[in-house]
Image (cartoon, rainbow, N blue to C red):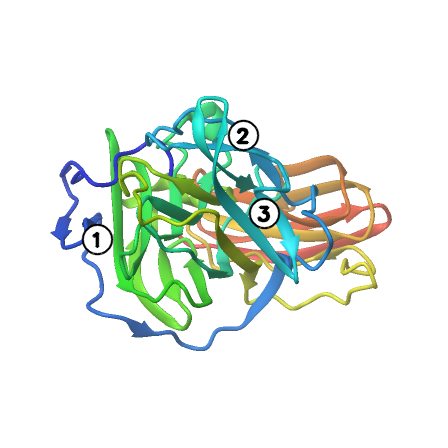
Amino acid sequence: MTARFRVLPALLTAGLIMLLAPAHLRAQGNPPPVGGVESQPQTWTLAWSDEFSGSSIDPSNWTFDTGGSGWGNNELENYTARADNATIANGSLLIIAKKESLGSNAYTSARMKTQGLRTFTYGRVEARIKLPQGQGLWPAFWMLGQNITTVGWPKCGEVDIMEHIDTVPLCYGTMHWDNNGHVQYGLSTPCDVTQYHVYAVEWDAAGISWYVDTVRYCTGNIANNINNTGAFHAPFFILLNFAVGGTWPGNPDGTTVFPDTMFVDYVRVYAPGVAAAPRGESGLPEAPVLLQNFPNPCNPSATLRFALPRKSTVNLTVFDLLGRDVRTLVNGDEEAGYHDVLFDGANLASGMYFYRLKAGGFIQTKELLLVR
């Protein structure tokens, strides 16, 4: 969704493959799998979610982008933080696009994000969504690298978990990054977007796979930073938005009905292969907990996760077999909740390491295997 022209073929760069197919399907980076693939059972632990079960949007989870600048895509809407454009009703988030003048824009809508509030590295990121259809409509569920404010786009990386345009019976999954300029890789899959579906990515140090419900339809390779894909081994935040018009979908016409709504039943983020911690009434653990890093083994980075029942002074340190500190990842006050911290072992030798969490009187240590 960020500052790009989606209807033009991307540039072919050395070591990448470009596929141009109907409905503006583009792919770069890796040969895609042929057809959909039924996913295999996987054990996941819920790390964070918003079930939209309250009476209003939770400000501890979401903030808003606002304004009508075109957002790099010649979009026509003015994004607002008004309840008229984003609200909770009957256990769902409703993002509503309206035909109304605001500033110099003829339409209003909303663009929500977890930036500065919730960030994630690896895992399964999913949402159950029902989408509008109409010429010039462009709803999306996506992620951006949290370092976008320092390195800019596309160096921060972008993962479009789901995009849909116009009345095309397809949804799109795409990754964007920098490799001597903007490059991208992605595919589309047939989908009746007017019905609820679970749109997801499963993301680890080896790759990113896109799903609609249980079917995997695309996988991108990011192992060992292939084709300069290092951006995808760092924290990302989540966005939900409903754009109107733009270079890719084109503008609304007389057939487009307003207002129209993007319905989001929930957004959930899972960590693979970790045990759930006992939880109190607040949904947080009853005591501090240190979870197993993922992936494990790692090469060269991993996410270390811990959870706190209340605000605490935290020290999270990685040390080697001789007890020597090799990384201090956290040293200070942290709020109650689940926390993800990126460990980068790029400058360390292969072998067994340990990481220790201290929070008040709590101390716990786990093993981390670095294989390079």
Q: Identify the amino acid type marked 3.
A: Asp
Q: Which quarter shows the N terminus? A: top left
271 sits to left or right of 199: right
Q: Earlier in the sequence, mark 1 or mark 3?
A: 1
Mark 3 sits on what residue? Answer: 320
- Rounded to the nearest angstrom, the CA distance separating label 1 from label 3 is 36 Å
**Residue 104 percent across, percent down from the top left:** 44, 22
Q: Which residue is drawn at 36% across and 60% down?
A: 210
Helix, strand or loop under label 2? loop
- Rounded to the nearest angstrom, the CA distance separating label 3 from label 2 is 47 Å
Question: Extreme front residue here?
Answer: 254
349 sits to left or right of 35: right
Mark 1 sits on what residue? Answer: 30
Q: Identify the amino acid type marked 1.
A: Asn
- Vertical comparison of 197 with 121: above or below: below
Asked whether the viewer can see residue 223, the reply is yes
Q: Nearer the viewer, mark 2 or mark 1?
A: 2
**Residue 291 percent across, percent down from the top left:** 65, 59
Helix, strand or loop under label 1? loop
> What number is the disc on residue 66?
2
Q: Residue at x 66, y 42 (%)?
A: 317
Q: Which of marks 1 and 3 is in front?
A: 1
